[in-house]
Amino acid sequence: MDKIVILVLGGSIGTLARYFLSEWGQARWGIAFPYGTLTVNLLGCLMMGCLLGWMEFRYGALVEAPYQLRLLLMTGFLGALTTFSSYELEALLFLREGAWEKALLYLGISIIAGLLLIVIGLKAVRVLANFL
């Protein structure tokens, strides 16, 4: 039962963060492109890299970090924040409209920039950890 409570707590916060960040992105950059979801997914990738780097620094390895902490932050919070089902749906909607260029651009930016941001987050935490 403790696992469920941890997931609900992390997931609830992640869901709210996703909603507000997505709304902010759409309001900031418009509705012609799914900027809100893109913003959330890229930020989530950066946060995942930072968490990975911190947990590896603090505990030596991800699997050595407390299970409840990983459940709360990675599975609960980030799992709710960065659901890629919205990403896939929006790409499909572009494809249905015949907007192949937008679909490919959206898919490409999300995958490539997301991976880059995970690496950047991981390296940033390692540099900071070595500095401290």
Image: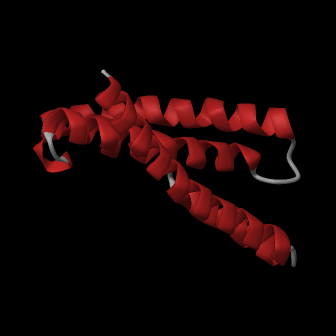
Q: Is residue 109 above or below residue 95?
A: above
Residue 21 at least partly seen = yes
- Residue 114, by quadrant, is bottom right
In the rendered image, the quadrant that contains the C terminus is top left
Find the residue positioned furthest to the front. 131
- Residue at the image position 54 percent from the left and 31 percent from the top: 17
Tell whether 128 sits left or right of 25: left
Q: Is residue 82 left or right of residue 2?
A: right
Q: Is residue 81 visible?
A: no
Residue depicted at 46% across the width and 50% down the height: 118
Q: Looking at the picture, does residue 28 appear above or below residue 33? A: above
The percent coordinates of residue 103 (x first, y second) are 76, 70
Q: Nearer the viewer, residue 40 or 13?
A: 40
Q: Is residue 17 above or below residue 97?
A: above
Q: Quadrant of the N terminus?
A: top left
Where does residue 46 sit, x and y in percent of width and height?
Answer: 50, 43
Instruction: From the viewer's perspective, tell me whether residue 23 is left or right of residue 117.
Output: right
Residue ID at (34%, 38%):
126
Reply above or below: 86 against 48: below
Res 29 → quadrant: top right
Coordinates of residue 54 in the picture (x, y in percent): 29, 35
Task: Estimate the x, y position of residue 45 in percent, counting from the top left.
Answer: 49, 48
- Most extreme residue toward the top, as rendered? 132
Q: Is residue 41 left or right of residue 72?
A: right
For the point 76% across and 67% down, the residue is 105
Q: How many marks?
A: 0
The residue closer to the viewer here, 62 or 119, is 119
